[in-house]
Image (cartoon, rainbow, N blue to C red):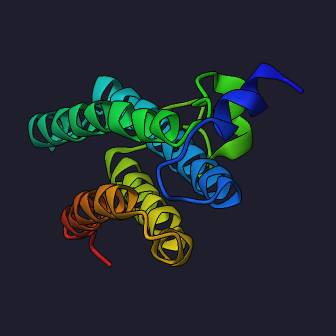
């Protein structure tokens, strides 16, 4: 038996091993989405140009800072459930529902659209976990998911409000 499996079995927090594993897997996807969106947002912060430079540069900085601060609590919840948190670009590439940032920086409003869609995608990832989390009576994860949903839905709304269509 591997050390990883034996460590996970020693945990008795009132959540079944299979449920903890499934929740940790779902949170790993949320972590990958969050980190991918963080990296894209930071990229756009560096590379935005045009008449809205000042406001978008500041907005993107606020958003990437929030995303950066979110990755640790997600990873730590995965660890509290007895599983290893993913932490490589390769793992995030496999787990994330988001596309990587474009190779060439897009125009400012395309950046806004990409980020709005990214926040919506992360919200969907978080929301998909609720049935399992509720079934397992995992209130700490439910609280984390609720917090993440609030942030992502508000960010998506603010970004969408900048778009013409």
Q: Position of residue 98 (x, y in %)?
A: 58, 51
**Rendered view: 38 above or below 133:** above
86, 136: nearer the viewer: 136
Q: Is residue 97 left or right of residue 94?
A: left
Q: Position of residue 49 (x, y in %)?
A: 27, 33
**Which quadrant is the C terminus positioned in?**
bottom left
**Which quadrant is the N terminus positioned in?**
top right
84, 65: nearer the viewer: 84
**Rendered view: 143 above or below 89:** below
Q: Which residue is painted at 60% across and 39% down in the image?
A: 100
**Rendered view: 115 above or below 32:** below
Q: Is residue 74 left or right of residue 28?
A: left
Q: Quadrant of residue 88?
A: top right
Q: Which residue is painted at 32% across and 55% down in the image?
A: 144
Q: Which residue is painted at 45% across and 56% down in the image?
A: 118
Q: Which residue is painted at 57% across and 31% down in the image?
A: 85
**Rendered view: 132 above or below 26:** below
94, 59: nearer the viewer: 94
Q: Position of residue 138 (x, y in %)?
A: 42, 63
> Disc count in the image?
0
Q: Is residue 3 left or right of residue 23?
A: right
């Amino acid at each position: 038996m591997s050390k990883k499996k034996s460590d996970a079995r020693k945990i008795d927090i009132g959540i079944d091993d299979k449920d903890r594993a499934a929740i940790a897997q779902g949170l790993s996807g949320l972590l990958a989405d969050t980190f991918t969106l963080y990296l894209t947002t930071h990229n756009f912060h560096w590379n935005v140009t045009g008449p809205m430079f000042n406001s978008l540069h500041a907005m993107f900085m606020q958003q990437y800072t929030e995303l950066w601060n979110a990755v640790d609590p997600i990873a730590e919840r995965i660890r509290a459930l007895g599983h290893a948190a993913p932490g490589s670009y390769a793992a995030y590439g496999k787990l994330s529902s988001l596309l990587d940032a474009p190779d060439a920086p897009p125009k400012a409003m395309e950046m806004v659209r990409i980020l709005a869609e990214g926040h919506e995608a992360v919200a969907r990832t978080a929301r998909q976990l609720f049935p399992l989390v509720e079934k397992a009576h995992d209130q700490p994860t439910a609280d984390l998911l609720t917090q993440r949903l609030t942030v992502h839905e508000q960010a998506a709304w603010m970004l969408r409000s900048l778009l013409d269509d």
